[in-house]
Image (spheres, rainbow, N blue to C red):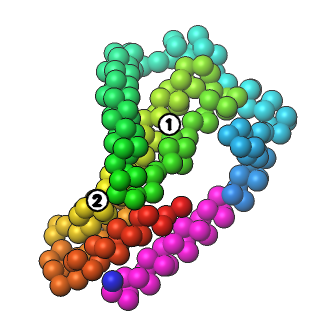
Amino acid sequence: MDVRIKQLIDQIKLLEDELTDELHQQEDQLLFQLKGKKVRFEQSIKQAHRKFKTDVWQWLFGLHPINLITAPIIYTMIVPLVVSDLFVSFYQAVCFPVYKITKVRRGDFIIIDHHQLAYLNIFEKFHCVYCSYANGLISYIQEILARTEQYFCPIKHAHKVLGSHSRYHKFMAYGDAENYHDRLEKLRSDLAKEE
């Protein structure tokens, strides 16, 4: 990998770590703590949150008609999402051990915690659980497929890719035939060493 590119990647990683630290400091200011999967707010914050909760009937009567009309379309997406979840999880369970690829931890991607917010009513919580599952699932699937791509075909595209996965920067340049087989084995062995 080009030295300058490696330096830029290292700088990005440092900035991501700095951002994470800053976000944790802001969490402290919001007065909540994480206890395993549970989020604990101070009692005064919980009470303040309840004051902002919209009554269910008020919320229902305040809905835009278009939201009600499109809701069935949105929520029927749960079927292909769950089917994809089952197939991709089965694929990972069977194939990753064969190729010595470290499995993707589902809980690192599918985080469902918005339902613990006291200022959301039951419908808002339901929407948040759905969106958290759907977006987390897509990230989980993307990571499984990114590891698969790293194992079988870690080559960048000739064209610019928008929204590439987190492993893409490690891939070989398009047309770099000379280093392909050596780098391929290195990238494959890296997959087995991941935590």
Percent from the top left, x then y, of residue 17?
Answer: 59, 68
Find disc 2 in the rendering and name its residue. Answer: 149
Instruction: Give the residue displayed 14% in from the left and 77% down from the top.
Output: 175
When the figure is inspected, residue 113 is found, relative to residue 142, above or below; the finding is above
Residue type at numbered disc 2: Glu
Confirm whether the magenta stretch covers residue 165: no
Q: Which residues are magenta?
A: 2-23
Q: CA distance from mark 2 to mark 1?
A: 25 Å
Which is more toward the observer, 37 or 126? 37
Relative horizontal placement of residue 47, taking residue 108 as reference (left or right):
right
Is disc 1 surrounded by few (<14), some (14 to 19) or many (20+) residues within 10 Å? Answer: some
Which is more toward the observer, 13 or 82? 82
Find disc 1 in the rendering and name its residue. Answer: 132
Instruction: Give the residue displayed 83% in from the left and 39% down from the top.
Output: 42
Is disc 2 surrounded by few (<14), some (14 to 19) or many (20+) residues within 10 Å? Answer: some
Residue 59 visible within the image: yes
Relative horizontal placement of residue 7, taking residue 186 as reference (left or right):
right
Q: Quadrant of the N terminus?
A: bottom left
